[in-house]
Amino acid sequence: MFLLLTETGLTTWQIVICFVVVVAIAFIFVLIKDKINKKKASTGEDRARVWGILQKALPEEADLTKAYACWEWSTYQGRTRTTTYWYYGVAFNEDHLYIAPLSCKSGNVESSASYVIRKEDLGMMNSKQGANWVELYDKNGKEIVSLSVFAENLKDDKYHPFNLLQKEEADKFVEWKDKWMESVNAANGVEVTGKMKKPLKKR
């Protein structure tokens, strides 16, 4: 862009002004988009869609907190970065964690086979106290699933498919996760790092 503006004969100050204007327009666009997405999230439409799909995977009369969870992770090969995204409906209580993987293709939200995790099934949970993310591992140290639960989820691009607000659920998820992590890790005699994908502290 700088080269293009230079070739038009603009002075340095004119180039700077043009750059500032472009940045300002981009910033305003982001603010407007963010406001629109928050308004859509406030209707609860996407929340109801996720909750409805999740409900089908849950036992009747179960006292569970429902939430939308996601995870994204980037890997590198040379200069090439590949990011993978996962989406879930989750429900949890003191004894169980229900997980319904979500598919969000072409605007349609569907769930593949759901599953349940009991606290005694786990060999380790990696996170930090108060963090909104967690990695769950089985007794053999194999990762089962990784989750993050955000209070605010906005449809910024095709990789973030929902406008969904869930502050109360996100707070409850952190509280639940911290209690489970303390119990699971103590029962299995492990101490975690709190670093993503590098869970176990070396002795």
Image (tube, helix red, strand yellow):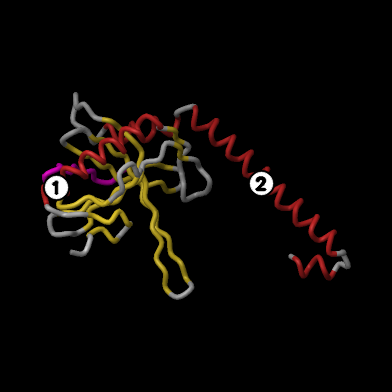
Relative height, residue 199 to residue 102 (above, below)? below
Q: Position of residue 177 (x, y in %)?
A: 26, 41
Give the quadrant of the C terminus.
bottom left
Along the viewing direction, whichever of 39 and 126 lies nearer the viewer: 126
179 left or right of 71 in image = left
Q: Identify the residue position indicated by label 2 in the image.
A: 27
Which stretch appears magenta? Answer: 111-120
What's under tag 1, amino acid-wise? Answer: Ala
**Magenta region includes residue 149:** no
Give left or right: position of 16 versus 119: right
Question: SS of the residue at dot 1?
Answer: helix
Left or right of 18 in this view: 95 = left
Q: CA distance from mark 2 to mark 1?
A: 47 Å
Please state which of residues 101 and 4 is positioned toward the viewer in this rendering: 4
How many badges with numbers are in the image? 2
| Residue in the image at 24% along x and 45% along y | 113
The type of residue carrying mark 2 is Phe
Which residue is found at the position 18% from the left and 31% from the top? 59
The residue lying furthest to the front in this view is: 203
Q: Nearer the viewer, residue 78 or 177?
A: 177
Residue 85 badge: none
Left or right, 41 with reference to 71: right
Q: Which residue is mark 1?
A: 186
Which mark is in front, 2 or 1?
1
Q: Residues within 10 Å of mark 1 (few under 14, many from 20)?
A: few
Rendering coords of residue 18 (x, y %): 79, 56
Tag 2 secondary structure? helix
